[in-house]
Image (spheres, rainbow, N blue to C red):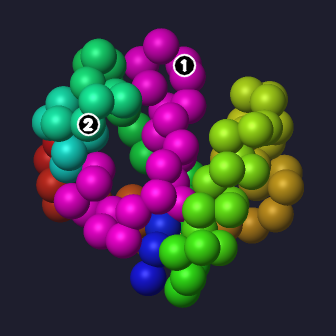
Amino acid sequence: MWFVYMLLCDNSSFYIGITNDLVNRFQQHSNKQSFSTKEFSGIKLVYCEKYDDTHKAALREKQLKGWSKAKKQMLIDGKLGVNTCTEFAKELLNGLNL
C-alpha cells in the first residue's frame, strides 16, 4: 500500500510526498531526517490518500504538487471530495507523541 500525503509546515506551506510506510516517513519528517522539511520546527499531517500501486501514487503526487495553495486547501477542507484516509492516518500516528 502506498500513501500520498500532505503536510502543513510551520510557514503555512504544504509538503507533498509518497511513501509505503507512513508512520516511519512522518517520524523522519518530525525528527528532521528529511532534507525537504528539516528546516521547519513544526509539521502536521493534513491529508493523505491510499493507493495499491506506486505508479498511481506517483502520478497523484505530481498532480497535487501542480495545484495552487488554494486548491490544496479546498482538498484538505473536503470541498473536492471526501477523504477517509486522513482520519485513518491520524489514528495511526496518534500514539507517536511527536
Instruction: Indicate the secondary structure of the residue bearing disc 1.
Output: loop
Q: Residue at x 74, y 67 (%)?
A: 82
Q: Residue at x 26, y 25 (%)?
A: 38
Residue 35 in the image, given as x and y percentages of width and height: 28, 30
Q: Residue at x 62, y 54 (%)?
A: 61
Residue 90 in the image, given as x and y percentages of width and height: 39, 60
Are there few (<14), some (14-19), or many (20+) residues within 10 Å of tag 1?
Answer: few
Q: Residue at x 20, y 45 (%)?
A: 28
Q: Is residue 33 above or below residue 3?
A: above
Q: Is residue 86 magenta?
A: no
Location of the C terminus by quadrant is top left
Q: Amino acid at mark 1?
A: Ser
Residue 62 in the image, given as x and y percentages of width and height: 67, 50
Residue 77: tell me if it is visible: no
Between 90 and 58, which is closer to the camera in this rendering? 58
Q: Residue furthest front?
A: 55
Q: Is residue 11 magenta?
A: yes
User: Which residue is identified by label 2?
Assistant: 34
Task: Give the quarter of the image for residue 29.
Answer: top left
Q: Is residue 30 above or below residue 19?
A: above
Q: Which residues are magenta?
A: 4-26
Are there few (<14), some (14-19), or many (20+) residues within 10 Å of tag 2?
Answer: some
User: Which residue is identified by label 1?
Assistant: 12
Location of the N terminus by quadrant is bottom left
